[in-house]
Image: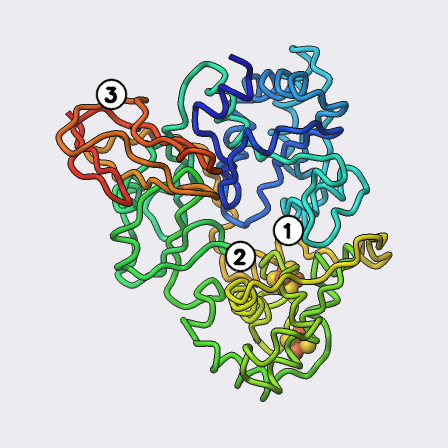
Amino acid sequence: MGILDKIEAAGVVGCGGAGFPTCKKLQGGMEYLIVNGAECEPLLRTDRFLMLNEAPRLVRTIAALGAEVGAAHCVIAVKRHYREEIAALRQAIEAACAAIAIHELESFYPAGDEVTVVYEVTGRVVPPAGLPISVGAVVDNVATIYAISQAMEDIPFTHKYLTVTGEVRRPVILRVPVGTRYRDCLELAGGVLRESCSVVTGGPMMGRPMSMEETENAVVTKTTSGILVLPPEGPYARGGGMDLTGMFRRARAACIQCSLCSQLCPRHMLGHPLEPHRIMRKAAVSGDIRELLNDADIQRAQLCCECGVCETYACPMGLQPRQINRAIKAELAAAGIRCRIPSDAAWEASACRVYRKAPSDRIAARAGVWKYSGYEIRELLEGAPERVEIPVKMHIGAPAVPVVAPGDRVSAGQLIARVPEEALGAPVHASIGGRVESVGRRIVIIGE
Ligand code: SF4
Ligand code: SF4
C-alpha cells in the first residue's frame, strides 16, 4: 500500500481547519509541500509541542511524503521566535540529511492562514476563492503531519493532541482518544478555576465560543486544537451573542467608514478584492442582507477567511465586520450564489502589506487573552476515558456510515464507520476498545 492509500485508510483529515480529507489534498502533484508550524492563534501550543518533542518523526514523515508526491520543495514554515522548536527541527533535518528547508516567519497574525503562508513561502498569491494547489502548493499543518506519520505505520487516526489552558488549574497539552468529552479534558487540566466562564473551542481569534450546556455535550474531534477557559466577558465572546439586526443597527450608528478594516485585512493586503468597509456601508444602510445578494461588494464577503483582524484588531468602533461577513456567506450559500472572480486577473500583494501585519502580541492583548499568553505549557498528559462519543462527521464531505451496531464489541483502532460509496469523506475508527452502547450521529463506546 502506498503512503496516500495508508493516509486514506487511517482516516487522516486536516487537523488545523475544517477537516479536509488529507489524501485528496495530496493527489495531483505539487511543487511545494509546505508544513505549517506557525500556530498563530494566541494560547495554542499543540504544534509547538510536537515540533519540540517529535521533530525526528516529523522530519522523516515530511521527507517520505515529499518524495511520494514529487514535491520539488519541502518547507516547514515556523515563526522566527520559536527558537527551541527551530533548533530541534534543524537538528532532526541534519541527522536525517533531509532536503527540507525552514522558512522563518515574522511574529504576526494570521501567519498560519493557508493563503498567507503560501505567499510568505513562495511569493505567489493564491487567487481569490482559489486553492493553494492553483499556484503549485499544498499546505498541511504540523499535527496533520504527525497523524500521517502514524498512518505510515498503519495506525489509524484515533488520538488527538490539544491545548487546554486559561482559567484551569493546570494548563496542559493533552493526548486523548477522539470522542473524549470536554468535561473529562477539563478535569485532566485540574478543573476550572472560576464559577462563571466562557469556553472557546480552538483559538481566541477564530475559535467558537460555547455555552456551558454546549461544553457539557462537546467532545474532542479530529480537528479540535484547543479548549480555552476564559472569563465570561471578552472579545472572544463575539459580542455576547448579539443578533444580526443588532450588529446592523450598531454599524448604522457607529461605522465611521475609516476603512481600517479593509486596510488591515490580510486577504485585502494580498490583493484580493475584499473590502469589509464597503460591505459594512451597504449592509448598514439596507439592514436586510437578502436585498443585497446581487451586489458585487457584498458577494465578496465569500473571500473572507474569518480571521477576525477587522473586528478584534482594526475597528476603532468595536463593530463586527467578520460576523456580518459570516452571515452574508451563509445567505449566499443558501441562495447558491458564487462571487464572480475574473479568471484572467493577475493578483498582487499590496506594497503596504509588510507594514500592516498585526503583531502577535498585540493580537493577544486585543483578543483579551494577554494574561495567559506567557504560560509555559510543556507538560503532556495522556487521557484514558471510560467512555467516548465519536462523531461520524469530523471532516468536510459526507458523514461516515457506521459498520457497527449497539452491543458489538470493538477493539481500539477497529473501523467503526466507512466512507459512503463515491463520496468525499474519511473513515472513523474506535479510539478505545469496548462495547458499542449506541450508534447515531455519534458512536458511543464504553471501555472495558
Ligand atoms: S475576518 Fe475581516 S480581516 Fe479577516 S479576512 Fe475577513 S474581512 Fe478580512
Ligand atoms: S474599521 Fe470599523 S468603523 Fe472603520 S470602516 Fe471598518 S467597520 Fe467601519
Q: Which residue is found at the position 40% from the left and 41% from the top?
A: 394
Residue 110, disc: 1
Front residue of this view, candidates 1 and 68: 1
Residue at disc 3, secondary structure: loop
Q: Position of residue 387 (x, y in %)?
A: 20, 35
Give the side of residue 115 with respect to residue 426, left or right: right
Residue 411, disc: 3
Give the side of residue 397 with respect to residue 283, left or right: left
Is ligand 1 closer than 8 angstroms to the Cβ of mark 1?
A: yes
Which quarter of the figure is the C terminus placed in?
top left
Q: Marks 2 and 1: in contact by CB < 8 Å?
A: yes
Q: Which amino acid lies under the numbered mark 3 shown in the image of this protein?
A: Ser
Front residue of this view, candidates 7 and 173: 7
Q: Which amino acid lies under the numbered mark 2 shown in the image of this protein?
A: Met
Q: Position of residue 177 (x, y in %)?
A: 32, 31
- 10 Å crowding of disc 1: few (<14), some (14-19), many (20+): many
Can you identify the residue that label 2 sits on?
A: 205
- 3D distance between C-alphas at marks 2 and 3: 38 Å
Query: Residue 65, located in which quarter of the rendered image?
Result: top right
Q: Nearer the viewer, mark 2 or mark 3?
A: 3
Disc nearer the start of the sequence (1/2): 1
Q: Which residue is found at the position 41% from the left and 68% from the top?
A: 233
